[in-house]
Image: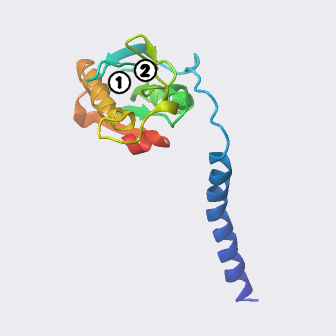
Amino acid sequence: MKKIIPLALSLLTLALLLSPVSAAKKASHKKAAPAKPAGPTLPGQKVTFPTKDGMVLTGQFVPPNGHLTFLLLHGVGSSKGEWAAFATRLAGEGYGVLAYDGRGHAESAMQAGQKLSWRKFRSTGTDNEWNQMQNDVDAALVFLSSAGVQSSSVAFGGASIGANIM
């Protein structure tokens, strides 16, 4: 009996660890839902800021009230709206928040009058759109600096591709 309990717990742990992998494999074969713009539940004011290569990114900004400011980037195929509940809670506690739509997503999908979609991003070459998203974080930091937020007071949060970009 004493040997059965640890074995059962080990199998349960293994099953729990593998189930997200299995679910992710199944989900990766499905088409991603189109990105949706943030709903009215995302706190703060709508802001835009330019990138080095001329994109204009759109976000929601809540200035800090004596606390850190969180820079939040969503997952692939999503939008800043995925942070609504978390951003609302942070803002309610006095933290600053800048959640923005990454290039090719939701309200940050226009460049020089052309629609840009993350679905058509190249993955080769050093100037590909995925790499340019890293420069977009710098543009967000420039925006925060212009709003009076010191870089030492910024915390980063990302989901999916947003975590890889940050």
Nearer to us in this view, 121 or 32: 121
- Where residue 76 sits in the image (x, y, percent)? 51, 36
- Where residue 1 sits in the image (x, y, percent)? 76, 89
Residue that carries the numbered disc 1 in the rendered image = 65
Q: Nearer the viewer, mark 1 or mark 2?
A: 2
Nearer to us in this view, 61 or 78: 78
Q: Residue at coordinates 62% horizontally, 36% vertically from top-left?
A: 32
Nearer to us in this view, 152 or 140: 140
Q: Tell me if mark 2 has few (under 14), some (14-19) or many (20+) residues whose alpha carbon lies within 10 angstroms of its own.
A: many
Q: Of the residues shown, which amino acid type is indicated by label 1?
A: Asn
Residue that carries the numbered disc 2 in the rendered image = 59
Q: Residue 55 lies in what quarter of the image?
A: top left
Q: Residue at coordinates 23% horizontally, 36% vertically from top-left?
A: 152
Of pointers 1 and 2, the one earlier in the residue sequence:
2
Horizontally, is 36 left or right of 45 in the view?
right
Instruction: Look at the numbered disc 1 and give the secondary structure of its residue.
Output: loop
Q: Of the residues shown, which amino acid type is indicated by label 2?
A: Gly
Nearer to us in this view, 55 or 44: 55
